[in-house]
């Protein structure tokens, strides 16, 4: 009976510890807050900064296996500049101005680029 109780206690503690790892993490860095969000499996889902409660600066997004899905910059909650999105062998380059898409380029990462 004691063994079963100990096993159940260990399982409960493990479940609580795992659940805590998936809660967002916020760290104050100067005037900004570094935010890290997690997938249910504990892998990082997104990371970046908040300024006055809005997404600000460089952000990174990852899939459940930790592979990079996207990266780009926010300016006080608005997407701006060049964003990159990965899907399989494809890389999509998207330009934003005032949160609107202004240009899209698709690249196949399996193609070799030679520089002469």
Image (cartoon, rainbow, N blue to C red):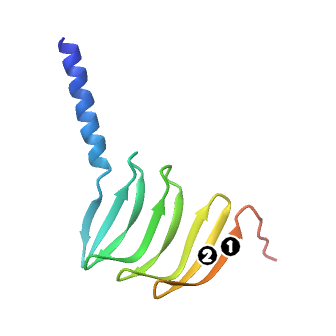
The extreme right residue here reads 116
Q: Residue furthest top?
A: 1
- 94 sits to left or right of 90: left
Residue 74, x across and y down, in percent: 41, 79
Precedes in sequence: disc 2 or disc 1: 2
Residue 39 image offset from top left, x and y in percent = 40, 52
SS state under label 1: strand
Residue at the (30%, 58%) spot, across then down: 24
Q: Is residue 39 above or below residue 106?
A: above
Q: Residue at x 51, y 84 (%)?
A: 100
Picture quadrant of residue 49: bottom left
- Circle 2: element type: strand
Q: How many callouts does the rendering have? A: 2
Q: Give yes or no for contact between labels 2 and 1 (Cβ–Cβ under 8 Å).
A: yes
* 7 with respect to 58 (left or right): left
Q: Quadrant of residue 3?
A: top left
- The image shows residue 59, relative to residue 15, as above or below, that is below
As rendered, which of 33 and 16 lies closer to the eye? Answer: 16
Q: Which mark is residue 72?
A: none
Q: In this rendering, would 37 be left or right of 83?
A: left
Which residue lies under the disc numbered 1? Answer: 106
Give residue 22's position: percent from left, percent from top: 32, 50
Quadrant where the C terminus is found in the figure: bottom right
Q: 100 above or below 35? A: below
Q: Position of residue 15 (x, y in %)?
A: 28, 36
Q: Is disc 2 surrounded by few (<14), some (14 to 19) or many (20+) residues within 10 Å?
A: some
Q: Which class describes the residues within 10 Å of circle 1: few (<14), some (14-19), or many (20+)?
A: few
Please report the residue visible at 67 percent of the width from the left and 77 percent of the height from the top: 105
Q: Which residue is mark 2?
A: 93
Which one is in front, 116 or 112? 112
Quarter of the picture holding the N terminus: top left
């Amino acid at each position: 009976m004691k063994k079963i109780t100990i096993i159940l206690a260990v399982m409960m503690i493990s479940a609580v510890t795992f659940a805590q790892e998936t809660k967002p993490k916020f760290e104050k860095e100067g005037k900004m807050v570094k935010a890290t969000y997690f997938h249910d499996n504990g892998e990082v889902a997104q990371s970046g900064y908040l300024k006055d409660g809005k997404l600000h600066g460089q952000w990174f997004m990852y899939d459940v296996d930790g592979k990079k899905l996207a990266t780009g910059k926010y300016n006080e909650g608005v997407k701006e500049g060049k964003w990159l999105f990965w899907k399989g062998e494809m890389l999509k380059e998207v330009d934003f101005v005032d949160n609107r898409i202004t240009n899209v380029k698709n690249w196949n990462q399996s193609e070799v680029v030679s520089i002469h």
